[in-house]
Amino acid sequence: MSNDVKENLKSQSTWMRGLYMLIFAVFYTIAEIVLFAVIVFQFLLKLFTGETNERLCKLGQGLSTYIYQILQFMNFNSEYQPYPFGAWPRGEPKAAKLVDQGNSTNVD
């Protein structure tokens, strides 16, 4: 093995990120289940009452943005650690910033 590979394998920050990725994989699964429940409930509300619940719309948006943030972190597209290590998302997701060896650019 080359010296670079040995150094990469010993990198504590990479192993810590891997641990965070495992934690976020669990949070992703939970958020996905809750979002599915919100979707089904909203559909049933619309079906039987003809209206949707505004609070559930906001919860669904927050969960969708949260899932997006998790996937961005897990795909190495973002260094931002979502909730519970960061703030709970409000509103739609912001444009992602690619992380490329310290250089970041906006993605449209």
Image (cartoon, helix red, strand yellow):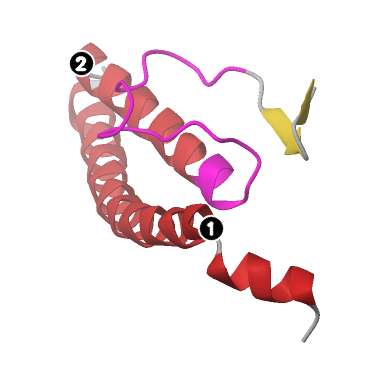
Give, as a three-letter code, the residue at label 1: Thr
* Amino acid type, mark 2: Arg
Circle 2 residue: 55
In this view, the residue farthest toward the front is 3
Query: What quarter of the picture does the N terminus occupy?
Result: bottom right
**In front of the other: 79 or 29:** 79
Residue matched to label 1: 14
Q: Position of residue 78 (x, y in %)?
A: 60, 36
Q: Main secondary structure of the magenta part?
A: loop
**1 or 2: tag closer to the N-terminus:** 1
Image: magenta residue range? 71-94
Q: Residue at x 36, y 14 (%)?
A: 90
Between 103 and 108, the one lying in front of the other is 103
Residue 91 to residue 23: above or below: above
Cβ atoms under marks 1 and 2 closer than 8 Å: no
Counting from the top left corner in percent of width and height, residue 34 is at: 23, 46
Name the one closer to the observer, 98 or 69: 98
Say which quarter of the image contains residue 67: top left
Q: Nearer the viewer, residue 104 or 82?
A: 104
Circle 1 packing at 10 Å, graded few (<14), some (14-19), many (20+), is few
What residue is drawn where x is 81% and y is 80%?
2
Q: Helix or strand or loop: what does disc 1 sit on?
A: helix
Question: Residue 43's spot in the image, x, y percent?
Answer: 30, 36
| Quadrant position of the C terminus in the picture | top right
Instruction: Tell me, yes or no, whether the highlighted magenta stretch contains residue 65.
Output: no
Find out whether residue 90 is within the magenta segment.
yes
